[in-house]
Image: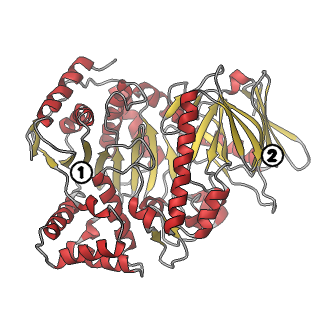
Amino acid sequence: MRYNEKQFNKEVDYYKKELSKTKIKNIYVYGTINKNAFFSFAPFSRAASELKIDMHIYLGYKNKGYDFLFDVWKTYANLKAKKIGAAEKALKNVLDIANIKGLETYFKAPDMILKVGVKGFERDLNLDYKTAWFKPFMSVKLKKTTDAVIQNVYALKKAEKFGIGFELIREKEFLAHPLQDYMDSYAIAYNMFLSSKFCKSVSIKASTARAGLRDAPEKVAELSTTLLGLELEKDIDMPVFKAYKTLSKLLKLDRIKTNDASFFVSGKGYHGKHIFGEKIGYPSPDMKTKWNSPGGIIYKFHWYPQAMIDQRLPRTRLAFTSTVPIDIFVDSTLVDYKKMRNRNREIADVMGRCEKIVVKSNIKNGCNFEVGLVKKNGIRRLILDSDSDARFRLDPQILKVMKKKTGMMANIPGGEAFTTPTYVKGRIVGDIVINIDRSYMLNGNEPFVVEAYGDNYKLISAAKEVKVAFEKRKRDAWKNILEQEKNKSLNKEIIELKKKNFNQVGEFAINTNPNARLCDYLIVNEKIANMIHVAFGSGFEADAATEYHMDVVIDSPRQKLDIYCVDKKNIQHWIIKSGAFVL
């Protein structure tokens, strides 16, 4: 442990003692970005989580994006107290027309609201900042790395707004990775702020994660998501959106803005179900399609079926990482981006000239499968190489090839050439890591084994914990589809597409990052040069969409994989031989 865990626990106990004097279920913290406040959230959030108290945090730099929430909470409080004015009538009209059971409860203000002060948290309760637990680690290299991300992944400009999401530290029983990894993520997130503070504004946000896709979400996160969706849709010709437009005008909710670029650190868990999106959905202006979340509208990734129909432009480009240790984050991210992207393109070019990819292991009980690259109508699948690139509002490859204006998403670290198979046949043996609700480590003695049959697959064997988590994720995803179908919150064609693709292998990728090394996290391991990965569920084209995407990494050197592409003339084009690149 590179941090003072004893001191950390002492600081957790301080917050627990103070919070135990109250009877609250949720806390909202807001204010200007402050280093002491930010690093205090580590013990503060652990204390709150141990007491079963939800938290939501919004800090801004040259940014007061949290202001609108207070007006909404006040309006709802007035409505309940029967202090009825124009805004209260408008809010009641929105809730009445929406007619969604339980939605109203999200408009109630949190039990406790705290503001970031000079020396501590203040307002409903005075709390000291507690940061003695934190000790800088690799600080110079870390700042150099986050500078490189801002420049090479985002090409962030001075006139742009930037958003950062970080992970709260839950109780010990919830965490799936070492406490030190979560502590490290605070330094990573804060350095991302330091590297981006030259731009127009920066916001830092976090909220308490949920264990399942179907769980009720944290209140403030859900209210913020709902209001963003309504604001994006206020000109749609439907009663609920017309009603919201009146509320928006009265409360000046056009203050709700999206960022030009966003970064987040992903830990274990989910937002939970998004109630308005599941029950009603968000139509496109021409009413030809529907989204089930505001995120779909603002990111508009090309693999969403709606992105092929909705004419609105994407608003935000996105990149994310996991709660990876600082040294691994630095080593795998501080790379020669031009060289790595050229390597991706080289592999993608070979895949793009061929009909199929063959993957065969030279050891007993290893992988032996085939990946189709051409559809039945003769159209080739896209071979993608932009996994570390979110420099543009519009994805240049998709604009060039498909003539569609869609957004960009990047992984940090990056390094892969990938595609959406038209079919996968054979045995897939995952033996490094699989990402479900978090990353689960695998090994050669108890691998994740799947048999693929072309348009579907079957899980043959896996470690018990992995099997249980995998099957639960699929069950929850299927329930999401059925709820969307029941409520007609998505078009029938999209529902049928998600059902059709539910049991497919959605991605095949060859990893190319020369600096990535083995660790506990899929986002790094799926980039290790010479290794490969596949994903079950959604692919990266609109016709391959479904409700989940779970990646598994395969140890090409250990399994001594032969990987080659076969063209129309049945000529083999080798990429990896006996576990090592030959291309």
Please tell me whether residue 432 is drawn above or below residue 124 in the rendered image: above
The circle on residue 356 is 2
Q: How is the image coloured?
A: secondary structure
Count of numbered labels shown in the rendering: 2
x, y (%) of residue 92? 24, 74
**Residue 224 visible to the viewer:** yes
- Answer few, some or many: residues within 10 Å of disc 2's Cα (few below 14, many 20 plus, some between 14 and 19): many
Indicate the quadrant containing the C terminus: top left, top right, bottom left or bottom right: top right
**Residue 315 visible to the viewer:** no
- Answer few, some or many: residues within 10 Å of disc 1's Cα (few below 14, many 20 plus, some between 14 and 19): some
The circle on residue 453 is none
Nearer-N-terminus badge (2/1): 1
User: Amino acid under label 2?
Assistant: Lys
Q: Is residue 43 left or right of residue 341?
A: left
x, y (%) of residue 120? 11, 38
Secondary structure category for the residue under label 1: strand
Say which residue appears at 13% left-offset and 76% top-offset: 84
Residue marked by disc 1: 60
Say which residue appears at 19% left-offset and 62% top-offset: 73
Q: Is residue 279 left or right of residue 353?
A: left
x, y (%) of residue 530? 67, 29
Q: Nearer the viewer, residue 316 or 51?
A: 51
Secondary structure category for the residue under label 2: strand
User: Amino acid under label 1?
Assistant: Gly
Please tell me whether residue 477 is drawn above or below residue 451 in the rendered image: below
Indicate the quadrant containing the N terminus: top left, top right, bottom left or bottom right: top left
x, y (%) of residue 236? 41, 78
